[in-house]
Amino acid sequence: MSGLVQQVREAGIVGAGGAGFPTYMKIDVKVDVVIANGAECEPLLNKDQVIMQHHTDDFLDGLQLVMAQCGATKGVIGIKKKHQHSIDVLSGRLPANIELMLMENVYPAGDEYELVYEATGQRIPAGGLPKDIGVLVQNVETLYNVCRATKALPVTHSLISVHGEVVNPKTAWFPVGTTYRDAINSAGGLLCDDVVIIEGGPMMGSVTQDLDTPITRTGSGILAVKADSVLARRKSAPEKEYRRIGKSACDQCSLCTEMCPRYLLGYPIKPHLVMRSLLTSGETSETLSINAQACCECNICSLWACPEMLDPRNVCATTKRDLKANDNWMSAEQLQAKMVDVHPMREYRGVPTARLIRRLGLNGYDKIKAGFDDTQFHPQTVVIPLQQHIGAPANLSVAIGDVVEVGDVIATAPLDAMCVPMHASIRGTVTAADTTQVTIQAAV
């Protein structure tokens, strides 16, 4: 490994706000362009803007470090036109080989496929990766963490927007392992008793009612919404229910497909045909089901396009699961063969974020911004999962009773596995430890 790649691995850096792919593997490539994703396309989140406005130097240094590592001659920062403060902060500080790419305030502007196409005019191959066309995409917080890795500072905190049914919405750095309950209490507590937590953004985030869930390195948002809200009910619906209703109610209007961002880019995804597969069986069903494989699960089909409020997104997601289980998963070459030209109406079908917020029933929350709170938060206890990334879990390296400092390694990464180490996020004593998680009690 090169020096930077090794530093990034030892720092435990994974994609911030995404699936958690280990960054040391992602940057160990040669590309022409590095794109910093600061689009923040999910409503109500503010973490990307905080990084660019308040940690500008470290973010830009991280971007240039990754560019040098990958041999890239060009850097692009994707940001929406509406974020004028971020644009103003960055504009006078960019070197000649880094430029701003200003985007419309639409969803999902921050999707990796959308970013790459807008920045380069090229499409990521179906079933492929940006590196296949000489591009690397990184979240802005990830780039900030890369800079810190060169200063021997591992990932111990995650930048989280806390919003919704809370007294004082905020965006702040929380030690990894902080519970949702503690994070919400730091924002003044809940405004009502019966809430559902959306982890991440309201479009692609998952739901939980467990306030003891710990914040991880891949976290981005904690959105508390009323449990009886339309958004909460739709996101909480069981698979048996949305597949049954889809089977009985879908009239094949095809709006889910016509509004699908990946379909508009020419990828082989047709949610309306996946919905049709619910009515069939055998070979016919299999032929229709393969139209789900290229789904990115952005939720436009379910939460915006469908006039009957059906759930093509979850039908596609569960169908992808079944395609893998039944060995019907197409190869990248097979997917690529099904690509077509970019839809001529694509640029007119972006979903305006302001209208999306109203559709989601969040228009009351958007009146208050989750502004940056730079106050250091000190939880009494953290519970740190050892599996916060794609790949193998880290190996426990502490025992009950051990005293740890912030940044100490508590789980190591096997050299022969895709893995990163885990670090203590607070100073204190290990009170519980097993192969799945480590609990640390803060020192008095």
Image (tube, rainbow, N blue to C red):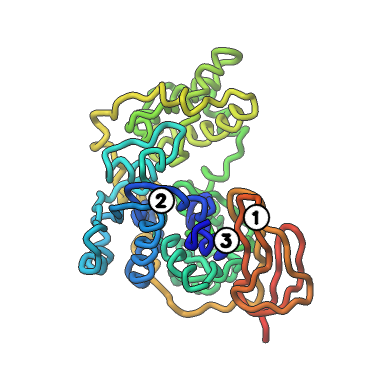
Tell me if 406 is positioned left or right of 75 in this view: right
Work out which residue is located at the far top of the displayed protein and give it: 283
Residue found at the far front of this picture: 2
Quadrant assignment, res 133 = top left
**Residue type pointed to by label 1:** Leu
Which of discs 2 and 3 lies nearer the camera? The answer is: 3
Q: Using the image as rendered, state which of residue 237 and residue 289 is in the foreground.
A: 289
Q: In the structure shown, which secondary structural element does the residue marked by tag 3 occupy? A: loop
Tell me the mark number nearer the camera, choosing from 2 and 1. Answer: 1
**Residue topped by disc 3:** 216
- The single residue placed furthest to the right in the displayed view is 400
Residue 282: percent from left, percent from top: 61, 14
User: Residue 335 appears at what percent x and percent y?
Assistant: 45, 25
Kindly identify the residue that appears in the image at 51 percent across and 55 percent down: 24
Residue at image location 24% in from the left, 68% down from the top: 93
Measure the alpha-carbon separation of dots 2 and 3. Answer: 27 Å
Please provide percent x and percent y for residue 431.
Answer: 76, 73
Callout 2 amino acid: Gly
Task: Return the residue at label 2.
Answer: 361
Neighbor class of circle 3 (other Cα within 10 Å; few <14, some 14-19, many 20+) is: many
Q: Amino acid at mark 3?
A: Thr
